[in-house]
Amino acid sequence: MARIAVDARPLVMVKRTGVENMGAQLVRMLLTVPNKHQWHFYFISPPSVSLPASIRWRTYRGPAWLRLVVPLWLLLDRIHLVHSAGAPLYTGTNFATIVERL
């Protein structure tokens, strides 16, 4: 079982770009996937949608989100793979990463 972190910020955004719409659709699709892997969703605002109990999520809105908070979460959650839409979810660490860009 892989531990996968997902940049779930697009799911709670009101106004989205094309990349953010794609990210929100991906997160919605992941909510329907059977529990083959352990999913960790990272937000800057609490999710406004109901998440299954199997989804682990964290939220933080403040300074140093990408440079300090997210890398700490990745270590604490022992993440194997990180998925982010648009820009890298974190900087300065060595995790396997998928970044989708247009």
Image (tube, rainbow, N blue to C red):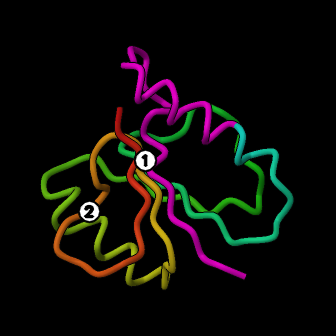
Q: Residue at x 44, y 59 (%)?
A: 98
What span is colored magenta in the figure?
A: 1-28
Give the farthest residue toward the right. 34
Where is residue 74 drawn, in percent x and y? 39, 75
Residue type at tag 1:
Phe
Find out whether residue 20 is within the magenta segment: yes
Rendered image: mark on residue 43: 1
Find out whether residue 4 is within the magenta segment: yes
Residue type at tag 2:
Tyr
Q: Earlier in the sequence, mark 1 or mark 2?
A: 1
Quadrant for the N terminus in the image:
bottom right
Where is residue 96 drawn, in percent x and y? 42, 75
Quadrant for the C terminus in the image:
top left
Q: In front: 97, or 48?
A: 97
| 12 left or right, relative to 36 | left
> On the image, numbered disc 2 is attached to which residue?
90
Q: Secondary structure at mark 1?
A: strand
Give the farthest residue toward the front. 102
Where is residue 22 drawn, in percent x and y? 52, 30
